[in-house]
Each structure stands twice: as C-alpha cells, then as structure tokens.
Image (tube, rainbow, N blue to C red):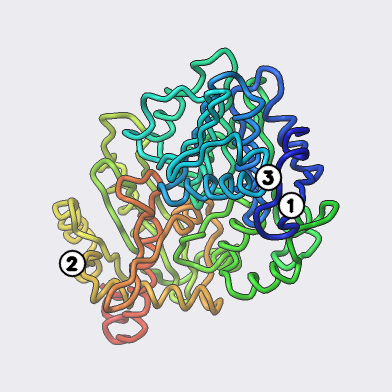
Amino acid sequence: MRFIQSYLTVPRGAGVGRKVRLRTFQRDIIAGAFGDGVRTALVSIPRANGKTMLAAFLALAEMFVGPPSAEVIVVASDLRQASIVLKYAKRIVELNPVLAERVQVYSDHLYLPENDATLLPLPAEPGALHGHDPSLLIVDELHVVTEAVWEAITSMAGKRPESLTLAISTPASSADSVMWRLVEHGRSGTDPAFYFREFAAPEGCDADNREAWRIANPALSCENPFLAEDGIAAVRKTLREPVFRQLRLGQWVTGVDGWLPFGAWEACASEQSIRGPIVAGFDGSASGDSTALVGCTMDGHLFLIGLWENDGTPDYRVPRERVSDAVDLMFDRYEVLSLACDPWGWRSEIEQWGKRHGTKRVVEYNTGFVGRMAPATDRLYQAIVDGSVTQDGDPRLAAHVAHCVARPTAQGDVIMKDKRGSPRKVDAAVAAIIAYDRRAWHLANPKKHLRAASF
C-alpha cells in the first residue's frame, strides 16, 4: 500500500494524473488478500468499482516490492480483456519518470530487470496457462472461467513458498459456475487460506433503493467517491432488472439470461384447491433430463402433479412404472379433459395410457415442432406477465421455470436449458407450457371439450 500511494499515478477516470489514494475498502481488500497464510482470495464486487484499476496497482506493486523474480500473471476471458490491466500498468509507468526509467515496456508484457520481475496477460484458455510460476495470479472476471481453466490456474499456482491467486469479479449469471462454488466456500468461513469479500445489496431489496446501491458499491459510498449515483440511475433505466441486480448490485439472481422477467413467476403464486375439469402436460426423458407431469385447471391455475429427476447416479433411469401409476392416479382423481404428451421416448407408454383412458383424451404433443411450441410458449409468457395465470408455488416447478432461457426463432421464442448437458433442468416448465396450451385448445373448441369430458 505504501508503494502504491508513493509511486503510482491514476492513469484515467476520476483523479487522473494525481497520485493514487487508496480508499478504505481497497485497503481492506489488500490487507485481507495479502494476509498471512492466504493462498486464494475472491472479491465479488459490482461493475464500475475500480477492480481492473486495482489489479493494475497490485500487479506493479508485486513487481517492485514482491519476491525476487516475481511473476504476475493476469488472466481474463480473452487476451484483449487481460491486456486492459497491462494497458493501465503501462500508462502508470509512463506517468512516473522513476518507474519509466526502470521498467522495460514491451507490447505484450512488462519486465523489471533489477528484480527479474514480469507482468504478463494471458487468455482464460487451459493451454495458455501451463509452464508459469506466478507469485501473484490475478483473475479478472472469474464469472467467465470454466472448470477446465480453473483447474489449469490452480495447477500453476502455489508452487512458491508464498504466492497468491486473487480473483476479482462480478457475480456469474448462473449458480452452475466455478465462481458460485468458490463463493459458497468463502461464505462458509472454514478455510483460513481462503480470503473472501463480497459487496452486494441486501437480499430482497428494491432495485431502486439508493441506499442498497451504496451498500453494494463501495466506490459510491467511500470517502472521495469515484462512482456517480446518477450514472447508476441512468443504467437502471436501460438494463433488465435481473441484469441490473447482477452487474450493479452484486447479487446472485436467477433469470439473468432468463425467459421471464424477474419476479414474474413468483407474483403468480396462489394457493387454491383443484376443482372442475383439468388438462395436463407431460414431458418425459429416459435418464439425463427430468420427467414432469403438470396440470392446469380451465380457469388457468398450473400445478405440479409429478416430477421425477435424475438423482445423480451413473446408471439412473426414470421409474417408468411409477410415472404410469401417477398418470393413472391423475385420471382417477381428477376430471381430465386431456393429457398432451411429448412422444419422444415414451410412445409405447402413451399408447397404453390411451387404451386405458381414451385415445381422445391422451394425445401426442411434439415439443420439437417450433411452429407449435413457439406460440404456446408466448401464450404462457403473456399470461404470466399480465397475471392472468396462477401457479401453486411448488419450488420444484419454480426452479425449472427459473432455469429457462429463451431461444429466438422465426416463429417466436422457445425455451431451452442454459447450455447443453446443464444440470439446470427445464422439463417441468415445458410440461406447464404444454398444459396451458392444451387448455387454450379446449376453450377454443368447446364442443370437442364436452365430448372429451363425457368420454
């Protein structure tokens, strides 16, 4: 900290051209991350709080006052992003004649001959991260780092008697990430070699609460703030709420890339008994995905009837007999106008259900046909947004809905998982779309509705 404030100059932004004056929150981060015995540090902080600039300050300090032959590696999503820290460091060196005389500046790295110290940016690619021996490894935006990259990072860190891996990042858009796993580890407080600092607005706060903005953004509330409140207010008008919460309030939220607006599904929750005729949607799987059965009343109330999920065992298979039992029980318990089923992998069971409960009531519904699925998806989306549908508040159904990502097509959006093979399943949401669309069909065809009801 003494080196930074004695020799470094602010290269751009607020205070440009003046000596660096570390704010209290920056001092706290440095003191914690460079504390005795700390090998890994994670700072979760919203955008525009000077994290990349702080990385440049720490990189130069490591070169001058770190161990002999200090090697500072800066890792980011790609080489361009990683080189931003290098660009700041170069400019800082240029602004101080003492530093400029001693540091050799190259296009792709800095070198300090008197200490044999190097600053080198690298992309977040496993092949680029081998063969180094960093004393300080800075990961800029951990939220984009994959498991393979993190394994490469940790494999090259910790070789020296003293070294530090410091990750500074905004939260990831998904809990299915390296960063979330490390956040949970840091929150546990059980690892003295792991320093964790999280800047985030209080859970459940209003996104327009300016006090929450100040809690999440230390650059807004510190002495001599360098983040403007009106700038955050302007951003608030142009960002979707979940994105604003993630990037500017430092919160972990579902739906950042999601299908539904933040909080829309939760707003439709309603406790009510199931009366009168219903329709149902079925989306089945063989092993990897989930199998779901969702009902919908004719007045538009969605409720989860059954959900069979992979328990993580390598040889898991969906319990088909139990699923069939649940379908039979549904027909016994409710006045079922129709059950619409995605036929993939379940055609023989669907035929048996049709024989037992009527082929006019058990129908196929191909979710792979975009011309049908896109309008059905839009129908339920509009009903959720305008509050004309209700749902039973089941957390399992809510989780599947929260996992949905919208994929644009020429016919409209359809839903999908966030990525291929993701453990964040969406099958119950698909079944809900099928059920709600089947309800619309019966309302548009009342004569067929009556014939099915009297079957």
In the rendering, at what x and y percent does residue 379 appear? 40, 77
Q: Amino acid at mark 1?
A: Pro
Q: CA distance from mark 2 to mark 1?
A: 53 Å
Residue matched to label 3? 96
**Which of labels 1 and 3 is toward the front?**
3
The quarter of the image holding the C terminus is bottom left
Instruction: Please state which amino acid type lies under the numbered disc 3.
Output: Asn
Q: Earlier in the sequence, mark 2 or mark 3?
A: 3
Q: Which mark is residue 202?
A: 1
- Of the residues shown, which amino acid type is indicated by label 2? Thr
Say left or right for 215 vs 269.
right
Q: Is residue 432 at all visible to an observer of this figure?
A: yes
Q: Nearer the viewer, residue 39 or 428?
A: 39
Query: In this picture, is 313 found above or below 229?
Result: above
Q: Earlier in the sequence, mark 2 or mark 1?
A: 1
Q: Horizontal and vertical percent for residue 107?
A: 43, 45
What residue does disc 2 label?
359
Q: CA distance from mark 1 to mark 3?
A: 41 Å
- Left or right of residue 15, residue 56 in this image: left
Res. 384 mark: none
Residue 35: quadrant of the picture? top right
Residue that lies at the very extreme toward the top in this rendered image: 161
Viewer-nearest of labels 2 and 1?
A: 1
**Res. 433 image quadrant:** bottom left
**What is the C-alpha distance between the residues marked 2 and 3?**
82 Å
Which residue does the image show at 39% across and 76% down from the upper left?
A: 378
Nearer-the-camera pick, 439 or 360: 439
For label 1, the SS is loop
Task: Identify the element where label 2 is drawn.
Answer: loop
Residue at image location 16% in from the left, 59% down from the top? 355
Among the 4 quarters of the image, the one containing residue 281: bottom left
x, y (%) of residue 128?
35, 35
